[in-house]
Image (spheres, rainbow, N blue to C red):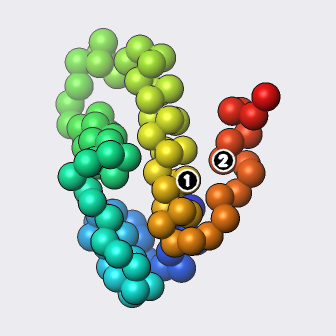
């Protein structure tokens, strides 16, 4: 949802990487490097989600450690911050809500 708003593209969806690349290109912005940093981590989370949701899992794998969820939050937050920075928009205060002293 946030990527759709920041990149002004309501069609970002199931083909996330390709859709984001198209939206960034349409805005005339430099390409993202999906092979490193937060973008690589974001794709890894997407792959993990697909595996959890769309394939048969052992019962024990359906309830991962809390650190897995915490990592999702960190990577999601970091990617939102980075997409705002990439577009030159101000990062909203709400994204750092639980990080503020």
Q: Quadrant of residue 91?
A: bottom right
Q: Is residue 57 above or below residue 39?
A: above
Q: Residues within 10 Å of mark 2 (few under 14, many from 20)?
A: some
Q: Residue at x 40, y 79 (%)?
A: 29
Q: Which residue is mark 1?
A: 81
Residue 59, position as x, y percentages in the image: 30, 16
Q: Residues within 10 Å of mark 1 (few under 14, many from 20)?
A: some
Residue most toward the right? 101
| Nearer the observer, 49 or 41 | 41
Q: Residue at x 32, y 65 (%)?
A: 32
Residue 41, position as x, y percentages in the image: 32, 42
Q: Quadrant of residue 75?
A: top left
| Nearer the observer, 65 or 93 | 93
User: Where the N terminus falls, by quadrant?
Assistant: bottom right
Q: Is residue 83 above or below residue 47?
A: below
Q: Is residue 38 above or below residue 29?
A: above
Residue 4, position as x, y percentages in the image: 51, 70
Q: Is residue 61 left or right of residue 79?
A: left
Q: Sequence-wise, which precedes: disc 2 or disc 1?
A: 1
Q: Report whether residue 1 is seen.
A: no
Residue 25, position as x, y percentages in the image: 34, 82
Regarding mark 2 in the picture, which secondary structure is present there? helix
| Nearer the observer, 45 or 94 | 94
Q: Residue at x 20, y 30 (%)?
A: 56
Do labels 2 and 1 touch, CB within 8 Å?
A: yes
Q: Which residue is mark 2?
A: 95
Q: Is residue 39 left or right of residue 78?
A: left
User: Where the C terminus falls, by quadrant?
Assistant: top right
Q: Residue at x 69, y 33 (%)?
A: 99
């Amino acid at each position: 949802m946030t990527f759709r708003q920041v990149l002004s593209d309501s069609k970002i969806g199931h083909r996330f990487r390709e859709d984001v690349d198209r939206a960034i290109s349409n805005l005339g912005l430099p390409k993202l490097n999906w092979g490193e940093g937060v973008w690589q981590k974001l794709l890894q989370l997407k792959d993990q989600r697909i595996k959890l949701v769309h394939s048969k899992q052992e019962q024990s794998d359906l309830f991962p450690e809390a650190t897995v969820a915490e990592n999702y939050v960190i990577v999601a937050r970091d990617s939102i911050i980075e997409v705002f920075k990439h577009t030159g928009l101000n990062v909203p205060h709400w994204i750092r809500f639980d990080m503020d002293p």
